Image (cartoon, helix red, strand yellow):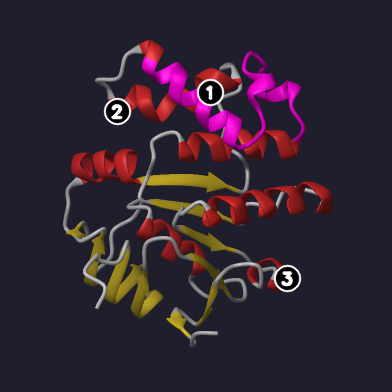
Amino acid sequence: MNATPPVIELTGVTKHFSTEEVDTYALRGIDLEVRKGEFVAVTGPSGCGKSTLMAVLGLLTAFQQGSYRLAGRDVGTLNGDARATVRNRHIGFVFQSFNLVGDLTVLDNVALPLKFRGGISRSQREERVRAALERVGMTQRLKHFPHQLSGGQQQRVAIARALVGEPDLILADEPTGNLDSENAATVMRLFEELHAAGATLLMVTHEAALAQRAQRIVPMLDGRVAGHA
């Protein structure tokens, strides 16, 4: 029996958006478990609930019913400040649009999660940033700004930023969506290397070929988990 709690444990999670006329259900009773070291791809057609699921997992939005435990801790009922603290310490994000700060160098972009965390000296931050950039092959671009990098390079910097805080979970939302096929392949190889080194990754993608490279696929349809492949 595995005594370590799952990194992700969703039970009966339901999320709906209300207007004057109608309630729209984005998630309908989601049950999902992801164990430490797994690489999971969430797939499905547009509007199936993938992005809402990612927002719930990243503590970017609340839900109305169910429970969410992250690395054994109930995080579904936390207030805004507590959610922000958990996000910073336990979750790394990789977005389709990179989300780098244009007037910060690569070094300073990657250091941001550690700056927000506090209690880490400048020299310690720089040491950890250099180690994260080394993992993604970008140490030679420390002093560059985002506009001086290709799309693929920017995404590698974004992955380093996700790694630098040593999170329990890396969430990647359509991480190759803005990349050409060559750079997309590079990013996927990097995810596979991180997975092989023990990282826990959950990736949302609409591309079946990319999903097949994950360890496990979770298909979604109409706000529900449609089954496991």
Q: Are marks 1 and 3 in contact (CB under 8 Å)?
A: no
**Residue 148 colored in magenta in the image:** yes
Q: Residues within 10 Å of mark 1 (few under 14, many from 20)?
A: many
Amino acid of disc 1: Arg
The amino acid pointed to by label 3 is Ala
Q: Which mark is residue 117?
A: 2
Secondary structure at numbered mark 2: helix
Q: Residues within 10 Å of mark 3 (few under 14, many from 20)?
A: few
Q: Position of residue 4 (x, y in %)?
A: 24, 65
User: Residue at horizontal 49%, vertical 87%?
Assistant: 226
- Left-right relation of 10 to 94: left
Residue at 24%, 20% (x, y): give it.
119
Our reading of the magenta stretch's main secondary structure is helix
Q: Residue at x 20, y 61 (%)?
A: 72
Element at label 1: helix
Q: Nearer the viewer, mark 1 or mark 2?
A: 1
Question: Foreground residue, 59 or 217?
Answer: 217
Residue beneath label 1, please? 130
